[in-house]
Amino acid sequence: MKKIGVITTGGDAPGMNATIRSVVRSAIYNNIEVIGIYDGFKGLYEKKFEKLTSRSVSGIINQGGTILKTKRFYEFKNKEIREICYKNLVQENIEGLVTIGGDGSAKGAYALYSEFSFPVVHIPASIDNDVYGTDYTIGFDTAVNTAIDAIDKIRDTATSHERTFIIEVMGRDSGNLALEVGIVCGAEIVIIPEIDFNIENIVEEIKQEEKKGKNSCIIVLAEGAGKAEELAKILSDKLPEREIRYAILGYIQRGGRPTYLTRKLATIFGSKAVEFLLENKYGYMVGIKGEEIVGIPLIDVVSRKKEPNISYLDIIRKMAI
Ligand code: F6P
């Protein structure tokens, strides 16, 4: 293999830059030329290509976002569009592609591999940690740490004013981020889309906590389970004596300097992805299972759903006594 492409797609995640750096340098180390594809699959369609050198990726290990930029490109769902993307890769003499992104990007990567037999290796990067086959995605640890910072601050005001705070975190339709954030921030209640919740139970829990002398309360709400504003309104109506407030953490979770764990995963995954291409191990995603770096067939990644560890909810309940 003489020339490969690297692309970041879907929502950005901290550590994407560290991943690009690792892919570029691992490839160049093996005498492979690297073409950066800008703007995700949209840039692949529009041929936004640029040769990357070792120096192109200097000083980015510590930067959030992605130097290659990214776009949501829903048109990639059309086979004709994908065909043009494939032809663009071939015309540019790109012989392999490393895709960096979340579960949607894995689907795109799998389509290029399965429809055109194009050599693709995917690297999971998403703050949602919702990609099947890997314990962690690149960026998740940073997003959790960002949420910890924010919630610790909110806790100060929640305690001082004896308020109930609903904090909405990202995660799309997955509760992984909310659960992880909830357990490490000492939330009393965590609401995730995978488990139906009953508003009366939540009201009862808040009342019980008050009886135990707890006058402030942190509720972490996964965005996929509902809207913080609506939940705050419902709880205010049902508990008029309590001061209910809400905060939406939103996009701050997607930015910022990658943490130690994010950078480590990014650097190892990037290097492994290039190894896979050199070994003709295509149609795989790089992942981590326990301590081990593994390859998971993309067919499994795209056809299965990563379930959250709902046993965390029991621990959260125990910690709330
Ligand atoms: O997948 C990452 C993510 O940040 C989700 O948590 C969120 O629901 C979504 O992307 C937001 O997407 P967009 O950037 O298109 O608004």
Image: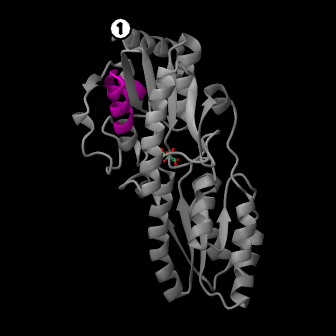
Locate residue 318, reporting x and y percent.
74, 75
The residue lying furthest to the left in this view is 55
Marker count (numbered):
1
Residue found 50% across the figure and 49% down from its top = 127
**Span colored in magenta:** 21-43
At label 1, counting other C-alpha atoms closer than 10 Å, the crowd grade (few under 14, some 14-19, many 20 or more) is few
What residue sits right under mark 1 in the picture? 91
The residue lying furthest to the front in this view is 30
Residue 254 in view (yes/no): yes
Type of residue at label 1? Gln
* Quarter of image, res 11: top left
Residue 37 in view (yes/no): no
In this rendering, would 263 be left or right of 214? left
Residue found 44% across the figure and 35% down from its top = 271
* Closer-to-camera residue (271/61): 271
Locate residue 314, reporting x and y percent.
75, 67
Q: Quadrant of the C terminus?
A: bottom right
* Closer-to-camera residue (40/293): 293
User: What's the coloring here?
Assistant: one colour
* Quarter of image, res 93: top left
Locate residue 134, reporting x and y percent.
61, 42
Locate residue 85, reporting x and y percent.
43, 15
| Secondary structure state at the residue bearing disc 1 | helix
Query: Would you say residue 70 sits in the magenta stretch?
Result: no
Residue found 38% across the figure and 20% down from its top = 4
Q: Quadrant of the N terminus?
A: top left
In this rendering, would 20 be left or right of 223? left
* Closer-to-camera residue (245/63): 63
